[in-house]
Amino acid sequence: MSDTQWQDMLNLVELLEAGEYEHAEVSVGDVQVRLSKTAPLSSPSGAPQVPAAPEPASAVGPSAPPVPDAAATSPALASPPEPEGTEVTAPLLGVFYRSPSPGADPFVQPGDPVTADTTIGIIEVMKMMNPLPAGVDGVLAGFAVEDTAGVEYGQVIARITEGADS
Amino acid sequence: MRAQHPVVLVANRGEIAVRVIEAAHRIGATAVLAVSHADRASLGATSADKVLVVGPAQAAQSYLRAETIAQAAVQAGADVVHPGYGFLSEQPELAEMLEDEGIAFAGPRPETLRAVGDKSSARDAAVAASVPVAAAENIEDPTDAEATLVAGQSVGFPLLVKAVHGGGGRGIRLATTTEELLDLVPQAASEAQAAFGNGAVFLERYYGSARHVEVQVFGDGEGGAMVFGDRDCSVQRRHQKLVEECPAPGLSDARREVLHSASRSLVTALRYRGAGTVEFMVDTQSEDVIFLEMNARIQVEHPVTEEAFGVDLVAAQLRLALGRDPELPQVPPVPESCAMEVRVNAEDPTLGFVPRPGTITSVRWPHGPGIRVDSHLYDGYRFPPFYDSLMGKLIVRARTRDAVVDSLASAIIRTHIDGVPTTLPVHSWILAQDAFRTGGAPTTWFEPAWEAHTEQEAVA
């Protein structure tokens, strides 16, 4: 996507931000943006989110020079050695839990088939439990974060590989 | 018990995030910055010791979510949260959630935020603390000419006849004489009845030529109050401040005393905690001084006060919140230096100040004695379209106001921001105007003057 297109997209998002809507879906060429003011954002099946595959923010020393926002600039360049499968990313900052309550069985295990609606975990924000759906049909390949870990918005939590007959 | 090396969660973005991170480092704290997805490459993100991405670009799902910010504070192991200005800075919800978690909030108590956040309760608090408010009288019976006259004389002329249930400027009439008042009150009442289904009207003193003067206060939370002078912020466009200075020029000692002592008593009455600003309207036609509102946060223009008095208000906020001595000195009502700030926005002044985000290809700020820059710009920064257009503040300090104006004008010329249009040319123009150089221009000065100037330019 060119700079101009990206700017147009940002302008559009800004316009929509002021409007009254709950969900909006915008396609420009082969890029799709989904906006929701209420629901947690999860990847639409197949299509990558924009910006796709956000790099988790890391601790940067005070003296580190500013770096250009690669992920926001060109979604295609975001993740260098792409691991297999669709990423399930955290829709908000919080604490990730694999089980509905302490000691209970995890919602799902690696290798389990999942559908887009399957809850694979919970993200807790100030005692509020937000179910995390798989977002796509497939097989849960594995988790990228530990149970009870603090996660940031956009952080990869799990991967779903496709091709399972579910 | 607070840690020796406390952790500060900075819950804001832009230049103020950078400013708070600096203050955190200054007091020996670790700074964790809560950012939106769009701000991961911001200057604040690179100067913080740690970054937490709290949500997507939209502020409603990141910077404005109290529970997410509180959660981030918990995950960061924060001892204190500094909210900056705007966003959640004056929302009691965040302050309450943090209180429940045993995390300090660098701002007033939740109940203070509630008390001053609502116009009518703020007015009540001001009246209770003997702070001057705008004279107003209710009209019980619009057909009772005698009572209307008494009310009009009590309020004073010129005055506004306003519908109690009106809004958006509708149902407002200006009366300059008793004759006009007697004509207008029944008219306004029947119009209000027709428009709003309620004919109740009241009279309020009108100030057609007033200045915006505010007092910087700092409370210890137990009734102790410190005053750090005043600021004049009368150069405004659509209620957005463009230029701010400390001290407010041309105030008589008596007037200044009224402003400062009223502010001090409000802080004491509220048992106000931390930095705050009491805003007033100062009439240029009379000696009247009118309370507008109290801002329960650090303000954009706080650097002029810091420069004029040589204090660090943000570090003081953090220290107080951490239970330490804020390390603020007693200062005289008028500082020994003058300081002035211009807000540099990514806006196109030739197109009605429309925001123009984009890539900052290069940025060069001026250097020299008494020059301070609070900004989050860097070469190649993609200034995002999601938030306000403030790119930075250029602040200059000198011994006299004339010297400040000259030094600032020169500093503006030496400022180069490429890639987006800026409001710098507007500031150059303002600093060259006699009405501004004299000092004490009212809030009604800038807009018509700038309009006339741009029309002239268009003709030429």
Image (cartoon, rainbow, N blue to C red):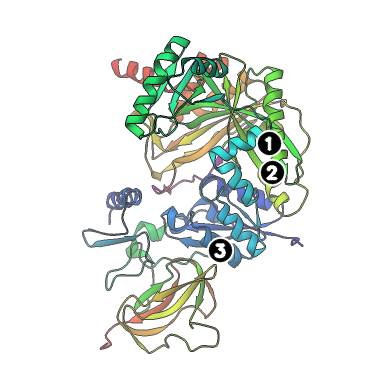
| Distance of label 2 from label 3 (alpha carbons) | 26 Å
Q: Position of residue B50 (x, y in %)?
A: 58, 61
Q: Where is residue B126 in the image (x, y as percent from the top left)?
A: 64, 34
Mark positioned earlier in the residue sequence (1 or 2): 1
Q: Crowding near pointer 3: few (<14 within 10 Å), some, many (20+)? A: many
Q: Residue B410, can we see it?
A: no
| Distance of label 1 from label 2 (alpha carbons) | 8 Å
> Is label 2 in contact with label 3 (beta carbons under 8 Å)?
no
| Magenta stretch: includes residue B374 | yes
Given residues B272 and B235, the one toward you in this image is B272
Residue assigned mark 1: B266
Seen in the image, is A19 located left or right of residue B93?
Answer: left
Mark positioned earlier in the residue sequence (2 or 3): 3
Residue assigned mark 2: B272
Residue assigned mark 3: B72
Taking A133 as reference, is B445 above or below it? above
Whether labels 1 and 2 share one chain: yes
Q: Position of residue B249 (x, y in %)?
A: 62, 20
**What type is the residue that disc 3 sits on?**
Ala
**What type is the residue that disc 2 sits on?**
Tyr
Chain holding disc 1:
B
Chain holding disc 3:
B
Which span is picked out in magenta?
Answer: B371-386
